[in-house]
Image: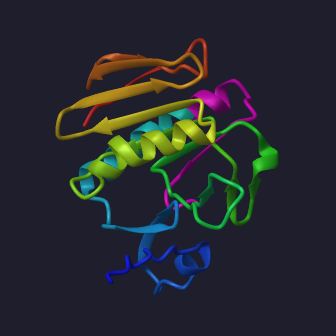
Amino acid sequence: MDTLKKEERCTIEDIYALPDGERAELIDGKIYYMAPPGWTHQKISRRLHQAIANYIDSREGACEVLAAPFAVFLSNDNTNYVEPDLSVICDPSKLDEKGCHGAPDWIIEIVSPSSKQRDYMIKLFKYRTAGVREYWIVDPEKQRVMVYGFENDTFEQYDFGEDIPVGIYEDFSIKVEM
């Protein structure tokens, strides 16, 4: 008689036990190892972070924009831990020295070859069900940005260089460029 082997479920403790310098995310108990980001990825991340931080600062806003590596504990459990490329958190009570506890308001993921499936499918579902208000997938290879407005159930696509309205703010748009 064959018995099915039960897949091992990992926990946040397994993430913290990784060797120094090794990065991974944990989604529903499964570890996804992360390759170091490339130069294009970092350049896009820096520009987006700077534009968002400048916008928030110019309005003396309460939101924080934080770049990876920064821990986001999406659920109140020990089987989900992600490090989005950029997280915008508008509820300061979610933040402490360990990271963000609960869903950020806005998450931006910059796709790399090793993260495609995770960003386009696994994280899309996870972020939506966790309560993220807005999710952007920035794809340097396609030079396209997919914008998911989970609050209003919207989806838009933009090419690099186009003004992209930010759903969580009424008067803010960004151009993504390489």
Q: Give the left or right position of residue 97, taking residue 23 as reference.
A: right
Q: Residue at x 45, y 26 (%)?
A: 148
- Extreme residue toward the left, this view: 141
Q: Position of residue 112 (x, y in %)?
A: 26, 52
Q: Position of residue 45 (x, y in %)?
A: 40, 45
Q: Position of residue 85 (x, y in %)?
A: 45, 50
- Relative depth, front residue between 43 and 34: 34
Q: Position of residue 133 (x, y in %)?
A: 59, 30
Q: What span is colored magenta in the figure?
A: 53-70
Q: Residue at x 64, y 30 (%)?
A: 56
Q: Give the left or right position of residue 76, taking residue 71 as reference.
A: right
Q: Quadrant of residue 101?
A: bottom right
Q: Give the left or right position of residue 162, taking residue 85 as reference.
A: left
Query: Which quadrant is home to the C terminus?
Result: top left
Query: Which quadrant is home to the N terminus?
Result: bottom left
Q: Give the left or right position of residue 34, taking residue 55 as reference.
A: left
**Whether residue 161 is situated above or below residue 62 in the rendered picture:** above
Q: How is the image coloured?
A: rainbow
- Relative depth, front residue between 50 and 105: 105
